[in-house]
């Protein structure tokens, strides 16, 4: 139905149910108190709006019919109710899942624009971290609130896409850490700050992680950051044939770490919606086997990391969209690739350039050139001057 609502925190969804029939008509069960005057016209004549209380009777009316239900998105109650009504239940993927995962041209362009806007907010935040915060050494809560404030100042933020993760020092070694009163820390010189956050905009959903040095980084911190960066670049630049799944390319992001005896214990990438959930399936990039091929238009994260328990954590995350297969000069088969959507500079103080190949250095410089070209026009003052320096060649 391509509608949005406010029933779920951080995810713009209405709580509702629907019965979609093979003739294209549908019944949408939605609290009438939450329906705008424009919704019926948007849905059209083929969709009937009904109160949630009418769902029981509508399911009973399916007696003798065959009904497809996605077991991953439906509770056992629906199966039991339909069985009691005498319907034949078929288990399968929701037919909306793949069309939703494969973004169309309008959604992809919307995501590009959302990421440019979000990139300006992120760049202002990174400037603040690299200047003001280096002196005031704020706590994690202030860090998260400052990033949210910069996003709000875009004038387009509808909500965060999830609660911001701001991990200072050892808290950054907890991949899904959230600042709470009993664990909150101030950032400290000589350590790292990991910040993972995102925004919900009408034209797209963002999710980005950047790791920043507080003070001068150690040689070990620079080495580990650069190993993570090498894996991130490998995933960003991979070409792959049609039919390739996420688990088949997951090792590319881990290989630089593996070769030195390190790894991370989370997936490399998850699907992301279009002003929808920041976690969206069925696509993902992870060690776990997943039979879903990566298809043109799917948006996924690219987020390898390394976590030194009790000390600090590193993660580099951007969103990228699967591009249509294209021929490679001299090759035999067209190959998919990724277009980078997230636009925010990396902390060059943490990059050990000596560990990068010439191609990897060229990638970093090319990525930063894109950030400056697309985000720079939205910046001004000291923050713009800082961004120009941050995006200068290695």
Image (tube, rainbow, N blue to C red):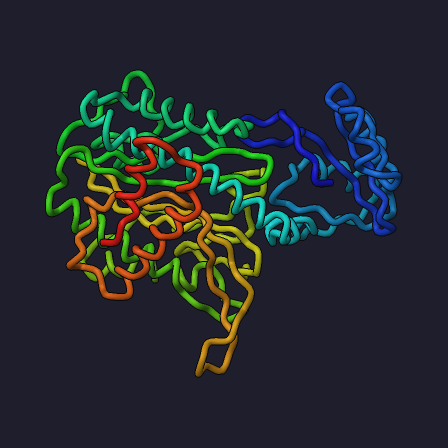
Note whether 32 is above or below 251 in the view shown.
Answer: above
Q: 361 or 83: which is nearer to us?
A: 361
| Residue that extends furthest to the front in the rendered view of this protein | 381
Q: Is residue 303 left or right of residue 153?
A: left
| Residue that extends furthest to the top in the rendered view of this protein | 181
Q: 111 or 15: which is nearer to us?
A: 111
Query: Which residue is drawn at the image coordinates 63% and 53% (left, top)?
Result: 105
Q: 372 or 128: which is nearer to us?
A: 372
Residue 292 location (% of width, % of height):
55, 59
Query: Which residue is drawn at the image coordinates 45% and 81% (left, top)?
Result: 331
Q: Is residue 129 left or right of residue 278?
A: left
Residue 257 location (% of width, % of height):
24, 56
Q: Quadrant of the N terminus?
A: top right
Query: Which residue is drawn at the image coordinates 75% and 28% (left, top)?
Result: 30
Residue 349 in view of the camera: yes
Note whether 324 is above or below 348 in the view shown.
Answer: below
């Amino acid at each position: 139905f391509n509608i949005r609502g406010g029933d779920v925190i951080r995810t713009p969804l209405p709580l509702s149910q629907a019965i979609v029939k093979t003739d294209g008509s549908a019944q949408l069960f939605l609290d009438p108190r939450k329906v705008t005057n424009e919704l019926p016209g948007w849905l059209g004549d083929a969709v009937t709006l009904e109160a949630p209380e009418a769902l029981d009777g509508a399911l009973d009316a399916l007696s003798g019919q065959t009904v497809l239900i996605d077991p991953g998105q439906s509770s056992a109650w629906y199966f039991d109710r339909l069985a009691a009504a005498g319907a034949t239940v078929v288990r399968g993927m929701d037919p909306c899942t793949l069309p939703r995962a494969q973004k169309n041209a309008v959604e992809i362009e919307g995501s590009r624009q959302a990421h440019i806007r979000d990139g300006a907010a992120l760049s202002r935040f990174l400037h603040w971290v690299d200047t003001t915060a280096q002196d005031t050494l704020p706590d994690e809560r202030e860090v998260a609130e400052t990033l949210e404030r910069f996003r709000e100042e875009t004038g387009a933020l509808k909500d965060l896409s999830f609660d911001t993760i701001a991990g200072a020092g050892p808290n950054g070694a907890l991949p899904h850490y959230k600042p709470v009163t009993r664990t909150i820390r101030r950032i400290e010189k000589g350590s790292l700050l990991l910040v993972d956050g995102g925004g919900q905009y009408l034209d797209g959903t963002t999710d980005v992680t950047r790791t920043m040095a507080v003070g001068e980084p150690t040689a070990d911190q620079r080495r580990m950051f650069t190993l993570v960066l090498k894996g991130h670049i490998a995933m960003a630049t991979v070409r792959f044939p049609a039919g390739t799944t996420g688990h088949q390319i997951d090792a590319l992001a881990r290989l630089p770490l593996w070769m030195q005896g390190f790894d991370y214990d989370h997936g490399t990438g998850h699907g992301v919606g279009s002003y929808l959930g920041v976690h969206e399936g069925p696509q993902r990039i992870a060690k776990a086997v997943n039979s879903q091929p990566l298809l043109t238009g799917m948006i996924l994260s690219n987020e390898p990391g390394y976590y030194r328990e009790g000390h600090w954590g590193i993660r580099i995350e951007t969103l990228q969209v699967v591009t249509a297969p294209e021929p490679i000069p001299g090759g035999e088969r067209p190959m998919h690739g990724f277009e980078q959507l997230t636009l925010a500079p990396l902390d060059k103080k943490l990059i050990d350039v000596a560990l990068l190949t010439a191609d990897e250095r060229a990638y970093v410089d090319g990525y930063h050139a894109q950030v400056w070209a697309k985000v720079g026009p939205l910046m001004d003052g000291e923050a713009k001057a800082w961004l120009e320096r941050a995006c200068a060649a290695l």
